[in-house]
């Protein structure tokens, strides 16, 4: 085969892959519609049973479609399409990880004492450039796009995490989805609460762990809360409110789990 033939074959292969990938992330939507709870958790038991019975289950098919996206194709997408792909991939592969280890009480219990579930190489994205969850979040989403709102979009399968959103993130709606998810997270009293009278703002540990991200995006954690939080938070800030970071509950966001306890410790 001549150079022209090789080039044509490669072009046709890329075109076929592009056409095969669904940028609406409909397969992920099918999973969310059936197994996501109203409170933003996941029915891991039924999902595990269904995936074991059906090798072509929407979750398996979706993860396969993500893994087939080439780096060249990904690079041709705009910023929003790339971010939507990575956020959905993080959430879907996290669900897959839990399903593979279910039943379990916490994502941290899926590995040994000194290991991290977020460092486990159990998938391959963009031709092997991404192989674990930490790489998606820290090396790509945080480092390359610098949008602090992603912290309300990625879900770590834990009670204190921002909830798993009901619909997939898409390029077309990404800004509105990130805005909505972040406002909802800050106004969720089970994850952030405010005491205007005392001036104390009890906020998620996420704001402590990733303080530099919020400083880059909005100047400070307090500016972030003032912009996205409810009126109670704004009144506390006007009184030079004090930030207090809540203990993080790593209990599994399972539909069978008890309600979140705001003060449960790590």
Image: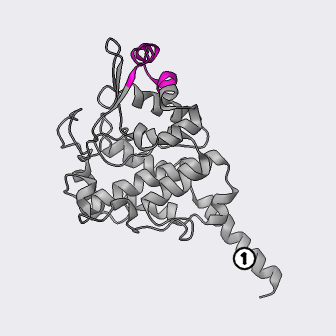
- How packed mark 1 is, by other alpha carbons closer than 10 Å (few <14, some 14-19, many 20 or more), is few
Q: Main secondary structure of the magenta part?
A: helix
Between 4 and 41, the one nearer to me in the picture: 41
Please tell me in which quadrant of the rendered image residue 257 appears.
Answer: top left
Region rendered in magenta: 225-242
* Count of marks, rendered view: 1
Going by the image, does 139 lie left or right of 132?
A: right
Q: Position of residue 74 (x, y in %)?
A: 63, 59
Between 245 and 136, the one nearer to me in the picture: 245
Q: Residue at x 26, y 51 (%)?
A: 44
Residue at the outermost bottom position: 1
Please tell me in which quadrant of the rendered image residue 62 appears.
Answer: bottom left
Q: Quadrant of the C terminus?
A: top left
Q: Position of residue 172 (x, y in %)?
A: 61, 39
Please tell me in which quadrant of the rendered image residue 246 appears.
Answer: top left
Give the residue pinned by disc 1. 9
Q: Residue at x 41, y 39 (%)?
A: 208
Is residue 245 visible from the viewing direction of this image? yes
Q: Secondary structure at mark 1?
A: helix
Q: Residue at x 47, y 67 (%)?
A: 131
Q: 95 above or below 218?
A: below
Q: 259 above or below 107?
A: above
Q: Position of residue 76 (x, y in %)?
A: 70, 57
Between 119 and 50, the one nearer to me in the picture: 119
Between 197 and 100, the one nearer to me in the picture: 197
Q: Residue at x 77, y 75 (%)?
A: 8
The colouring scheme, among rainbow, by chain, secondary structure or one colour, is one colour
Q: Position of residue 224 (x, y in %)?
A: 50, 29
């Amino acid at each position: 085969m001549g150079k022209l033939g090789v080039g044509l074959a490669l072009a046709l292969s890329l075109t076929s892959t592009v056409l095969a990938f669904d940028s609406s992330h409909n397969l992920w939507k099918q999973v969310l519609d059936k197994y996501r709870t109203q409170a933003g958790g996941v029915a891991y038991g039924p999902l595990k049973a269904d995936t074991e019975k059906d090798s072509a289950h929407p979750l398996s098919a979706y993860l396969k479609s993500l893994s087939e996206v080439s780096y060249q194709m990904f690079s041709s997408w705009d910023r929003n399409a790339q971010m939507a792909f990575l956020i959905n991939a993080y959430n879907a592969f996290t669900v897959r990880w839990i399903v593979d280890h279910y039943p379990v009480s916490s994502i941290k219990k899926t590995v040994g004492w000194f290991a991290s579930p977020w460092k486990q190489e159990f998938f391959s994205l963009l031709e092997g450039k991404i192989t674990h969850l930490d790489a998606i979040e820290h090396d790509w989403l945080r480092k390359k796009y610098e949008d602090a709102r992603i912290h309300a979009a990625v879900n770590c399968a834990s009670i204190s995490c921002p909830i798993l959103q009901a619909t997939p993130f898409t390029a077309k709606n990404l800004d509105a989805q990130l805005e909505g998810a972040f406002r909802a997270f800050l106004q969720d009293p089970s994850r952030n609460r405010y005491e205007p009278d005392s001036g104390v703002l009890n906020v998620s540990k996420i704001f402590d762990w990733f303080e530099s991200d919020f400083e880059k995006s909005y100047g400070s954690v307090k500016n972030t809360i003032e912009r996205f939080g409810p009126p109670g938070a704004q009144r506390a800030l006007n009184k030079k409110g004090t930030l207090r970071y809540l203990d993080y509950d790593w209990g599994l966001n399972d539909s069978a789990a008890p309600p979140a306890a705001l003060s449960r410790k790590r």
